[in-house]
Image (cartoon, helix red, strand yellow):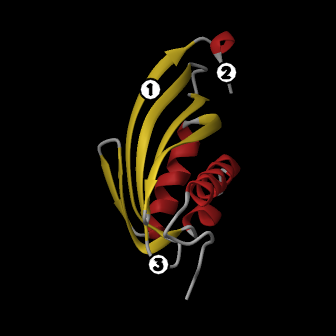
Amino acid sequence: MEKKYPLPPFTEETARQKIQAAEDAWNSKNPEKISMAYTVDTEWRNRSEFINGREAVQAFLKGKWEKELDYKLKKSYWAHSGNRIAVRFEYEYHDAEGQWYRAYGNENWEFNENGLMAKRFASINDLPIEEGERKL
């Protein structure tokens, strides 16, 4: 059985470790590697999209980074309880026309006993910015 440490129930320290691991993985922009942190039947809501399963996660992320160029993400701890972690985040990217954006949002994560994320619910807002306004 696959395991992704640290395992729940989380302490604040292990929740922060899980968040940093997710940030590092997403900044790699490697859909296959990232998807291994999720259950085979993971459930996502990303903005208005509903995504189910690792293969769908891989396809979603591949398409994401074909559109969101020079992507850079920063996640931060919000709260945790048992097998759940709440995260705040921001990321920056530009589109093919060169318009930069900063996206802000919140994620609610739920993990199985093996430390794989079973559910990910993300609320995200994009703000157009000038290249000189970038923070990340």
Residue 69, horizontal then vertical, whole percent: 62, 35
**Residue 96 found in image quarter:** top right
Q: Which disc number belongs to residue 113?
A: 3
**Residue 44 found in image quarter:** bottom left
> Three-letter amino acid code at disc 2?
Lys
Q: Which residue is mark 2?
A: 135
Q: Is residue 128 above or below residue 83?
A: above
112 or 47: nearer the viewer: 112
What is the C-alpha distance between the residues marked 3 and 1? 34 Å
Residue 85, horizontal then vertical, whole percent: 46, 54
Observer able to see residue 25: yes
Mark 3, other Cα within 10 Å: few <14 / some 14–19 / many ≥20: few
Please report contact status of discs 3 and 1: CB closer than 8 Å, yes or no: no
> Three-letter amino acid code at disc 3?
Glu
Residue 53, horizontal then vertical, whole percent: 40, 69
Q: Is residue 60 above or below residue 123?
A: below
Task: Look at discs 3 and 2 and give the one toward the viewer.
Answer: 3
17 or 12: nearer the viewer: 12
Query: What quarter of the picture does the N terminus occupy?
Result: bottom right
Q: Which residue is mark 1?
A: 126
Q: Which disc number belongs to residue 48?
A: none
- Residue at image position (54%, 38%) is 67
Q: Is residue 44 above or below residue 99?
A: below
Mark 1, other Cα within 10 Å: few <14 / some 14–19 / many ≥20: some
Q: Secondary structure at mark 1?
A: strand
Q: How many marks?
A: 3
Q: Secondary structure at mark 2?
A: loop
88 or 80: nearer the viewer: 80
What is the C-alpha distance between the residues marked 2 and 1? 15 Å
Answer with mark 2 or mark 1, whichever residue precedes in sequence: 1
Observer able to see residue 85: no
What is the C-alpha distance between the residues marked 3 and 2? 36 Å
